Structures are given as structure tokens and as C-alpha cells.
Amino acid sequence: SREEISYFGAGPAPLPTPVIEQSAEALVNFENTGLGLSEISHRSPTANKVLADAKSALSTLYDIPLEGDDAYEILFMQGGGTGEFSASVQACVGWWVERRRRRAVAELGEGKDAEVVERVRKEIKEELKLDYLVTGSWSLKASQEAARLIGSNYVNVAVDARKSNNGKFGVIPAESEWNLSDSKKSAMSYWCDNETVDGVEFPKFPDCLKGRTEDDGVVVADMSSNFVSRKINVRDYGMIFGGAQKNLGIAGITVIIVRKSLLALTPAPTFLQQLSDVLPSAIPPVVFDFATIAKNNSLYNTLPIFNLYVATLVLQSLVSTFAEKVGGQEELANRKASLIYEALDQYSDTYHVVPDKSIRSRMNICFRIKPKADSNAEPGKWDEAREKEFLASAEKKNLMGLKGHRSVGGMRASNYNAVSLTSAEKLVAHLVEFAATS
Ligand code: PMP
């Protein structure tokens, strides 16, 4: 049964059993209507209520202002985190171009269309930069997508964490070493808040990106794998995104939290078309155009309402379990992660935690197994045979999904919100027993 299995998969990942049970029922016969939730129109009142409930629970958890000068839009889309690697680039470049267009019109006067285009073209060539903090595989992928879409000349890798760590991810260099562009020239400053593959999590919001205004580059964070797992100040960000399939629900839904005032800066495609020689792919496909999606309350095209429903139930259960705010979930996540890291540290003759201590992820705990002290293995190598043994003996105890990502190997215990304290304790017991007996 589900209760017997402890699942530490990195995504798709476990969800609370009551959510899965209620969703299963909704798939067949939603609230006794005789129809399943995947069979009804995404424009029906039922679907609209699911959407409204999702927004309400998320705005409660993260304290997101939905009205007023500092209002944010909550959008639900498809395309996953990867879709947002592209959409974030096109959106931020568009907002940057529109800011420059408006400035040029203000300075040159109305009716000077050709001169305005010329001026913006020149500024794009001389100034436009997208800043990426590359601290793991997913921010690397995002930066590569930016280079593929708009050209590597516009991409500034402000940090490549591998350079400070023998070619491997596992550290975040101090902010004083980041090579960010001038914030007025930058269209975005991007990072992945939790690197799922490498087990690296930003301990806090970067000080040097605090207080950015509408005139500065947009602060963008990928929170796919630590969404709703700790308190954040949404107002620090221009845009946050995440695929649902870790902490939020099942694959097929992506959530975007974006500052409303940015959407008003979406440029006319006809203006961007005139700049296609210097910005070849700056116009997003319409399904990735945030302004269009916002105008249509995330229902511009068919939204997978069942997938959204699963996320809604997850969010509502967080709201009711943790007295409405995400801080309660944060405490639980920290407690589970501490238990696991303490065991790994305690048996450091056996285990090696991959990332540096200061930036260890609370969500993806990546570790390796050392050769035994009496083996004549090469120093610095991991004992892959022992790692296989670890995984096999874990599976015998129903501790599943502990294998590391194929690109890095080793072990990864994903400690998402739905992993119970009991599951974390069972893993700790296995870590202790393996170290003592293997
Ligand atoms: N960002 C992060 C942090 C991820 O962990 C993942 C996927 N695991 C992605 C982006 C890509 O998401 P998707 O597979 O939904 O495109």
C-alpha cells in the first residue's frame, strides 16, 4: 500500500494520499455530477472555481498581493519549467525593449517611428544583457536556451559555479564575485532557487538584487523544486515560476507569479518584427505570452483543469494544515532535511554530501558513498558497488527513488513537502544501519 512505501523520487514526486484519493474520485465522478473533471469544459463555472480556489490558496500561502500598485498575476500554463526557460527570456527582452521604445518616443517625440526603431536597435546591440547565475544543471539549461533564442552575445553568465569548484556544481560563490551587468542595461537577473540535480539551494534572496525597481532588469527565479517550501517575499521578484510535479501536483501545469505592471510593458509584435535582424526570436508563441494569458485568466486555450485541481488540493491542504502560511511547511521541511544531513555527517566515514554545507538543498539531498577505509581504492573516488548495495538494501525496506540523476550518479533523497517525517526517519535509520554494517 502507499503507506508502506517511502518514495524519494525527484519529480514526479509523491503527493499527499488524501489529495490523490480525492483526485482519483474527481477524475471519475466530480462532486457527484456524473462527469469526471477532465471531461468538462475549461470554461465552465466548475473549472473557474478550481482556478479561483488555486489562486486564493497560493496567494494566502505566499502572501501575494493581487490588487493595488504592487499587484501580481498568478498564471497557470503548460510547457513545464522548460517552457518557462524560453518564455521568461522573451518576456523580459520584450519588457526591456518596450521600456527603451517609450524612452525614445519621449525624447524624440511622436511620429518619429523610424528614428525610434533605429535608436532602440542601437541600444539593443550596445546594452542589452540577460544575467544568469549558473549554479547547477537547470540554470545552465536556462542560460543555454536564452543563448539559443536570442543569441549568446546577449547572455551574461554572471556566475558559473563550476569555475570555483573544479568544474563541478556544488558551491555558490560569494555575491562579491558575481559579475552582474549594470541593472539598467540588464533585462533580467535569473537563478534557479533550488537545483534539483545538484542539491544546491540558495540559502536566501540575494542581497545585491534587493530593491530592484521597474527601471531595472527583472528578477526571475525558477522555483520548480522548492515551490511552497519556505517563506519568500514575493515583492522582491519580478517573476517566479515552477513546474507542478514536485511540491505542487502532477506534471502538466506550470505556475507563474508575475508583477502585473510588467505585463503592461508587453511590446507590440509589429515593433519587435522591425528589430528581427538584431533580435531574431523575441516574439513569444501566443500560448507563452503572459499578457495574453493574464487577460484571459489563464483560459486563453484549454487549461488541464484536472491537473490544476490536484495542485489546488495540495495548496488548500497546506493552507489548512499550517495555519494559512508557508512558514509551517518550511519548519517541517527543515526538520526532515536536518535529520537526514545529521545522519550523513555523523557517518562521514561512509557518506559524502556533494554540495558545500552552506548551500545544501533542503529538497534534494545529494550524497555519495566512500570506499571502505581498508580498500585500496583511488583516493577521491566513490564506491559505486557500495552505492548499488545501498540502493538495493534501501529498496528491500521500501525506501524507493533514491538513485541520483543519471548525469551525476550517486544518491539523491528528495525531501519534498509530501515526504512524511516518518519516511525521513526511516531513511535515517537505513543510513545508520548501512554505515554500521556494510
Ligand atoms: N527547473 C527545475 C529546477 C527542475 O527541477 C526541472 C525538472 N525537474 C525543470 C526546471 C524542468 O521542468 P520540466 O520538466 O517541467 O520542463
Image: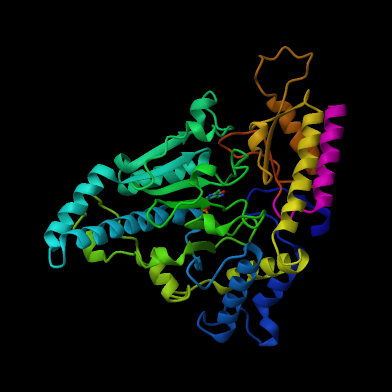
Is 434 a magenta residue?
yes
In the depicted view, which residue is nearer to us: 61 or 391? Answer: 61
In the depicted view, which residue is nearer to us: 301 or 362? Answer: 362
The structure residue drawn at horizontal position 19% and vertical position 59%, both measured from the top left corner, is: 107
Say which quarter of the image contains residue 270.
bottom left
**Residue 261 position in % (x across, y down):** 42, 66
Say which quarter of the image contains residue 129.
top left
Magenta residues, dominant SS class? helix
Say which quarter of the image contains residue 38.
bottom right
**Residue 276 position in % (x across, y down):** 21, 54
**Residue 224 position in % (x across, y down):** 57, 53
The structure residue drawn at horizontal position 78% and vertical position 23%, both measured from the top left corner, is: 349
The structure residue drawn at horizontal position 54% and vertical position 71%, both measured from the top left corner, is: 66
The structure residue drawn at horizontal position 50% and vertical position 72%, both measured from the top left corner, is: 68
Instruction: Please give the range of residues in magenta.
Output: 416-438
Is 43 rendered above or below residue 377? Answer: below
Left or right: 410 in relation to 104:
right
